[in-house]
Image (cartoon, helix red, strand yellow):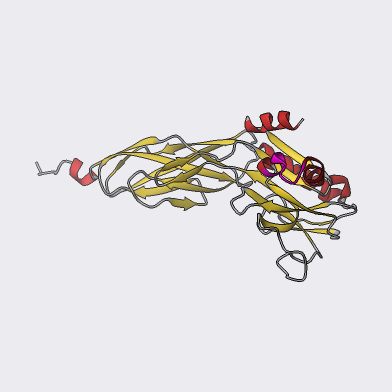
Amino acid sequence: MQRELQTYLDGGGRLAIISQEAAWWSSIVVGEDDPFLHRYMHVRYLQDDPGGRALAAAPGDPIADGLALQVNQDWPDEVGIWRTDSLAQPVFRFVGVPPRSNSAVTPLPRDVAEGNLAAVRVSGEPRLTRSGVEPAPIPYRVFYSSVTLEGIEDDKERTELLGRIVGWLTSRHTVEVGGQLVGYRGVGTMLHALARSEDPKTQFASFVWDFGDGSPLLQTATPSVSHVYKREGVYMVRVEATDRWGHKSVSPARAVVVHPSLGTLLPVSRGP
C-alpha cells in the first residue's frame, strides 16, 4: 500500500492522513526510519498520547487560523517535524503539554526541529526570484493529523476544519501578466496579474513582480501595479501569485515594450 501511495504522491497527488495511530504504526511496526513517515509526512513519532485534550492553532496557519479545538479522544500521537530543512509546517499544537525545549521533560531528538504537534501540512511551491523561477521542491501535498475528526467535540468546528483541509489540499491556480504591454520611458506602465483558479471563491493574498529591468522584486497586496522604466527597450516581466492557503503559481515571462519618452516622439509645433 505504501508503494502505491508513494507513486501517487510523486505524481502530484493530494493526501489527507487523519489517524491517531499512523505515526505510531509507521515508527513502531515498520521502523523508526520508515521512509514514508519521513519523506512524505515529514514527521517523527515522539510519543503515544502526550496528555493534551485541547489544540491551539499555529500562528498564521491558513488551515487552523482562529480555531481552538477541544478533543475527546484517547491516544493521539505526538509528532515532531523531522529535520530543520523540512517543508512541513505546524498546524495544531497540543495545549497543556510541557514544551520539549524545557529541560525538565524529555528533550527533542537531534533530527527533530519542533515537537508537541498534533497536525502538520507539507507542500512545495514554485518561487519567483531575481534569477528566474525556482520550481516546487516536491510535487505533492499532505495534511496529517493524529486527532481524528470524530475526536473534535464541536460539530461546527469539525465541519469548518474539514472544509479548510479540503480547500488547502485541492486549491489550484495559474497567473499571467496582463495590462499595458506597451509603455514609455519615465511614465508609469500599468500591469495586472491575471490570476485564475478552478474555485471561483479563491482569494489571492499577495503578488510578487519581476519587472525585468534589474529593479528589486516588488510585493503587492493587489493584482495591479504601476512601474516606471528608466530606459527604452523590451523587458520580460513575470508575476507570482499566492492564494489564501499559501499556494503559489508563477506566470510565463511576457514582453513589455518601452518606447522613448512621449516628449521625444511628439512633433514640436512651429506655428502657422
User: Taking 88 as reference, is 258 left or right?
Assistant: left
Find residue 156 and report its horizontal and vertical position in percent.
Answer: 84, 49
Q: Nearer the viewer, residue 8 or 197?
A: 8
Q: Quick check: can you spot residue 167?
A: no
Find residue 226 and report its horizontal and vertical position in percent.
Answer: 40, 48
User: Taking 5 as reference, is 226 left or right?
Assistant: left
Q: Is residue 247 above or below residue 92?
A: above
Q: Nearer the viewer, residue 258 or 208?
A: 208
Q: Which residues are magenta?
A: 31-38
Q: Is residue 22 above or below residue 74?
A: above
Instruction: Give the quarter of the figure containing the N terminus.
Output: top right
Q: Is residue 261 magenta?
A: no
Quadrant in the picture for residue 47: bottom right
Q: Is residue 32 magenta?
A: yes
Q: Is residue 83 above or below residue 17?
A: below
- At horizontal 80% and vertical 43% (from top left) the residue drawn is 22
Q: Residue furthest bottom?
A: 104
- At horizontal 59% and vertical 51% (from top left) the residue drawn is 85
User: Taking 111 as reference, is 161 left or right?
Assistant: right
- At horizontal 80% and vertical 62% (from top left) the residue drawn is 95
